[in-house]
Amino acid sequence: MKKILLMVPALICVCFSHAALPAYLDDTKDIDLRVADALGRMTLEEKVALCHAQSKFSSPGVPRLGIPELWWSDGPHGVRAELNWGNWDYAGWTNDSITAFPALTCLAATWNPGLAMDYGKALGEEALYRNKDVILGPGVNIYRTPMNGRNFEYLGEDPLLASRMAVPYIRGVQSNGVAASVKHFALNNQEQDRMHIDVKCSDRALNEIYLPAFKAAVSDGGAWTVMGAYNRIDGQHASHNARMLNEILKGDWNFDGVVVSDWGGAHDTQEAAANGLDVEMGSYTNGLTTESDIPFDNYYLAAPYLALLRQGKVSMETIDDKAGRVLKLIFRTAMNPGKGFGCVADSAHYAVAREIGREGIVLLKNSPVGKGMRPLLPIDTVRYRKILVVGQNATRNLADGGGSSELKVKDMVTPFRGLKELYGDRVSYARGYMSGKASYTDVENVSAAMSDSLRADAVAKAREADMVIFVGGLNKNRFQDCEDGDRKSYGLPFGQDELVESLLEVNPHMVLVLISGNAVELPWIDKLPAVIQGWYLGSMGGYALADVLSGAVSPSGKLPFSFPVRLEDCAAHSFGALCYPGDGDQVVYKEDIFVGYRWHDTKGRKALFPFGHGLSYTAFAYGKPSQSARQVSRGEQLRISVDVTNTGTVAGKEVVQLYVGDDACSLPRPVKELKGFRKIELAPGETRSVEFVINPQDLCFYDPALPGWRSEPGGFKAYIGSSSTDIRATVPFILSE
């Protein structure tokens, strides 16, 4: 006891006297100075140790210097449950249950950057409570094809929308002293053959479509880490790709953070050392093909890297750069004195999750069942007193499955539970179909007899109901919305097409709630009066859905991607197998810059539901726009404003969208491209003016011949509308020399 008491004054002196501290421990000093000081005190072995994992989800610090380890966690829509130290089995903790926030497709569908900030802040608080230093998200890969099993983790098909939503998310996470890790850099737009597929993409498409969200995340969001993708780019793996990491990310964009490999994404020591990878995680742990009992010193950036450094085959500058970046990350996170304690699964986080769900749900279609009737939604409880909920997704825990995004939730309000709590005994349930256990590695087959029995039961109950709410779509099983494998079909799985047709035959008063992170084929859409895109809504999803179905909240979500009528109407599926999924070795982006609505507009391929589409329970009228000038010179801004009025009888939110098109250009350009959006809330009869600023960069295209960005003088049009096809006003203007 005497020794302990004698130590107390010394500890107090260390804690409160910055003058007595080494520079690297003094948080009042410049972070680069602290990094330099720490590097000067470290051995080569200690520097190398910072560059690779020490467990499945941690990487070392410098114990001798009191520098702690880093703890990483999967995201991006919740903190993953604890795994064992050296394998992928769950540890079985009882205190790692969390909030499941809506998947990022739902966040994108809100078109509300303020909610993205709330999302990131709440997620960062949960990560902080769980002692995580890095959360692996957001994902900003572009939605190129609806077959990509991982689209639900991303922010849609448009680079501007993805950028505007990713930046506040990152700032929100990092406000807690927790790093966001932007992923998967880059061109990781399919899961099939993801570990080796070589992506061939033009420099123009790379710069106009696939890089802007990453650049915004780094330059505007200030992301502290970036995760490399699995795929190859022009023959070299993305996690140690010289052009992507050294030239673009760390060179052109001045990224000062850490590049971390996806788990198992490193493949070569020499390339990893020289080409910008800073931390290697999750490799096959003998450095080749299989796992071993004591693996981590065998990683590419472990003992093999140390050997190359000692042999002079790799520059010592590489290790100082890598270790310095990791130290900076540790100072920003694990050694950040401003961190709080965080919190998990509390009422405030549930409220954030519910609000994101409310604003992200998209009303795709809402028609009357018969002549002279009002639209089917919101639910008329006077007319519809017996409500039948059908579909396994109505009761399934959709936080399960999906791969690394799987979450252990403290509470999960399913769609059926949300409706049951609202309407009580008016609501009954029929399973209708079965999809098998949650798994991203195996597919459980369901017998035809079982499927027939479930369908017959649902149809019999639908015949007696006043209204049917079918909650179907995809789930997070293998070959659905799930990593490590793309979808096998554009249609709905598990016999849902036949089930929907059978239900409609006996009860036309039916709404489809589509749970998915992807577009799907809907061959019976003309027979169905109402369709809602319900996403993966997280812990409070059932309440959010009930809020919208009941009319307590008017839907305001807008699609962040297009719904093609047929898969062949999607650009990536219009040029043969080499364009998607590739030949097993490479995939060629033959559609170039014409992704999503850019393809539909330019090629005249009408979408079933266009990008930016979403209905409301009210109506919005757009006035005649005004503009600051008819002609602008290079370097000048153009201001356009328009009045928007709620002409309906209920309050609602509208997303006013601005697109710009170039009348003539020396290179092919889309008809129009999203350049701005504003989400506004209006009471019945209320009018608000919305102003957009068109900057010079908004008129530019990437010219690979320069290479660089430029614009050409001539005529342009600004399109203001409620979706990419619902254009309410067109404003022509001229760009002069």
Image: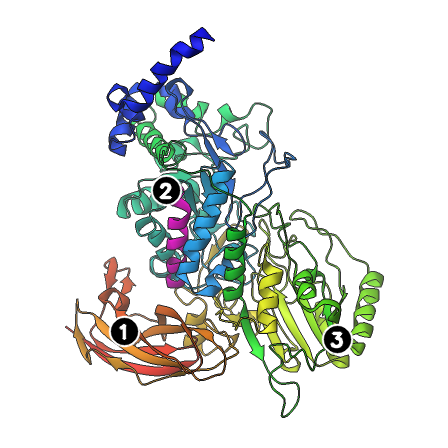
The image shows residue 463 at horizontal and vertical percentages of 80, 78
Which disc, if any, is residue 386?
Answer: 3
Q: Give the Cα separation between the discs numbered 2 and 1.
A: 38 Å
User: Would residue 234 be visible to someone looking at this image?
Assistant: no
User: Would residue 554 be visible to someone looking at this image?
Assistant: yes
| Secondary structure found at label 1 | loop
Tag 1: amino acid? Cys
Residue to which mark 2 is pinned: 224
Q: Nearer the viewer, mark 1 or mark 3?
A: 3
459, 585: nearer the viewer: 459
| Secondary structure found at label 3 | loop
| Residue at screen point 57% across, 78% down | 365
Q: Earlier in the sequence, mark 1 or mark 3?
A: 3
381, 414: nearer the viewer: 381
Image position of 112 with respect to 384: above or below: above
Residue to which mark 1 is pinned: 665
Q: Earlier in the sequence, mark 2 or mark 1?
A: 2
Q: Residue furthest bottom?
A: 372
| Residue at screen point 44% across, 37% down | 133
The image shows residue 30 at horizontal and vertical percentages of 24, 33
Magenta stretch? Answer: 160-176
